[in-house]
Image (cartoon, grey):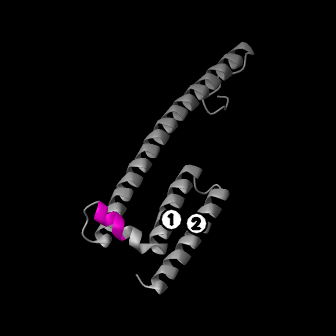
Amino acid sequence: MSLRLQIIIIACMILALIYIARRVAKKKLDFKFGIGWSIIVVVIMVFAIWPKLLAMAAHLLGIYDPVNMLAFVGLVLAIFAIFSLMMEVSKQSEQIKRLAQELAILRKDEHDNSVKSGVKSGNSEVSGDGNKH
């Protein structure tokens, strides 16, 4: 890897770390996702600073070409990221369902209470939208 390419990669990764930190600080990115992305960026920086580490790691894993190892690691990380995001979506889907059910119960209770108070005070029947009929 050429020195110029190393400098470009390191500069891009520093900018990525700054961007991630700003997104986390502005609450636009969850802290746990920010940590995950930051770890990936730091690992890329380590391999950019010491490219021989990538070749050694590839050799230890029995991978012929370090570039193939990068592609494999990228694929594994992408699958892991997709799985993590799907778990978040599932969790949020359950939360939305529970909140919708709670809201429906609250609205029904509110409606029942308004109908009861309308009947007790001798008012005409109150519809679900709060208007008297």
Residue 130 falls in which quadrant of the image?
top right
Q: In the image, is residue 71 part of the stretch drawn in magenta?
A: no
Furthest toward the top, the residue is 120
Q: Earlier in the sequence, mark 1 or mark 2?
A: 2
Q: Main secondary structure of the magenta part?
A: helix
CB contact under 8 Å: marks 1 and 2: yes
**Residue 80 appears in the picture as rendered:** yes
Instruction: Look at label 2 and name its amino acid.
Output: Leu
Q: SS at mark 2?
A: helix
Q: In the image, is residue 58 part of the stretch drawn in magenta?
A: yes
Instruction: Look at label 1 and name its amino acid.
Output: Val
Please give the count of numbered marks on the rendered protein.
2
- Residue at 37% over, 58% down: 78
Mark sitting on residue 127: none
Q: SS at mark 1?
A: helix
- Residue at 58% over, 66% down: 17
The segment highlighted magenta reads 55-60
User: Would you place residue 97 above or below residue 23 in this image?
Assistant: above
Residue 6 position in % (x across, y down): 48, 80
Split into 4 quadrants, where in the image is the C terminus?
Answer: top right
Q: Which residue is mark 1?
A: 41
User: Would you place residue 129 above or below residue 23 in this image?
Assistant: above
Q: Which residue is mark 2?
A: 17
